[in-house]
Image (tube, helix red, strand yellow):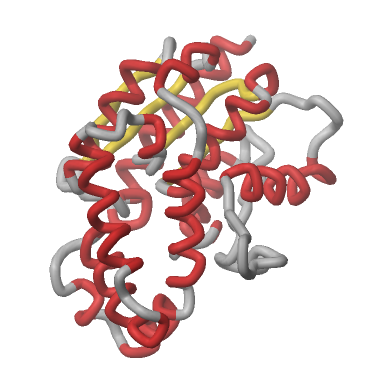
Amino acid sequence: MSSKAQWADLVSQLEDSFRCIAVDLLGYGASPFPADVGDGYVHTLAHEVDAVNAAIASRLEPGEAFHLIGHSYGGASALHMARRMPGRVLSLTLFEPVAFHLLPARHPARAEIVDVVGRINACAAHQDRDATRIFIDYWNRAGAFDAAPPAAQNKMVGMIAKVRLDFQALLGEAATLDDLSALTMPALVMSGAHSPASTRLLAEALAAALPEATAVQTRGGHMGPITHGAVVNSAIVNFLADAEVTAD
């Protein structure tokens, strides 16, 4: 339930050294809701990456390499993108990617998020506000949704249909931690000290599975790139500076 606007401060810090391309994922910001959603439709991370590739195609030369950054669902999409085109990704920066499909079914992190998804999906269409409350409170804190201004609540409720599709894509992806062994580019895996156990445990597993990964834990929680942007952005800037030296 965010947009590329969350990266504005990071872009301003990088634009003297990098050409930055910020992208809204499907259904968020200025990006349209997925097309052809209806009976039998199954959303996938491939849909997201296809849309990202279409959005950046005019900004890159054919085959041009790039550094890739993603947060939460954007981080899971970034992992799919990196697996699809590992030769083009110079470095991979992930803040708590919610790629729970990588974990075994009985892993506690996956079991925790499956429970959350089950509670969201148990809410009928006329209970979208209740479903949104479950989602927002899980990633932030109990009472976070009710504490938000009414206009913000309504905006979030309007996006819960896409959130349901996101979880469908995340849990339906056919990939495991072993599939990450081919991602040999420098990687930074970040997590928040006060995030849910599910994403902290997943970040640990990712950092161990990626061959060239560095793990960093910051203050704040899952929304660290927004709530603690100064700390998160500084770590990303420093990592990219090192990655550029490695790439050269």
Q: Which of 4 and 120 lies nearest the eye of the viewer?
A: 120
Is the residue 165 above or below the residue 181 in the image? below
Point out residue 111 in the picture as x, y percentages from the top left corner.
Answer: 23, 43
Relative horizontal placement of residue 187, taking residue 185 as reference (left or right): left
Residue 95 visible somewhere in the drawing: no
Say which residue appears at 59% left-offset and 25% top-offset. 83
Say which residue appears at 67% left-offset and 25% top-offset. 85
Residue farthest toward the front in the current orientation of the protein: 40
Point out residue 20 in the picture as x, y percentages from the top left corner.
Answer: 64, 43
Instruction: Give residue 63's quadrant in the image.
Output: top right
Is the residue 247 above or below the residue 72 in the image? above
Is the residue 187 above or below the residue 172 in the image? above
Residue 145 visible somewhere in the drawing: yes
Q: Which of 164 and 203 lies nearest the eye of the viewer?
A: 164
Instruction: Give residue 215's quadrant in the image.
Output: top left
Number of numbered discs: 0
Quadrant containing the C terminus is top right
Relative horizontal placement of residue 27, taking residue 190 as reference (left or right): right
Is the residue 97 above or below the residue 88 in the image? below
Point out residue 168 in the picture as x, y percentages from the top left corner.
Answer: 47, 53
Quadrant containing the N terminus is bottom left
Point out residue 115 in the picture as x, y percentages from the top left corner.
Answer: 23, 54
Say which residue appears at 47% left-offset and 57% top-offset. 6
Say which residue appears at 45% left-offset and 45% top-offset. 170
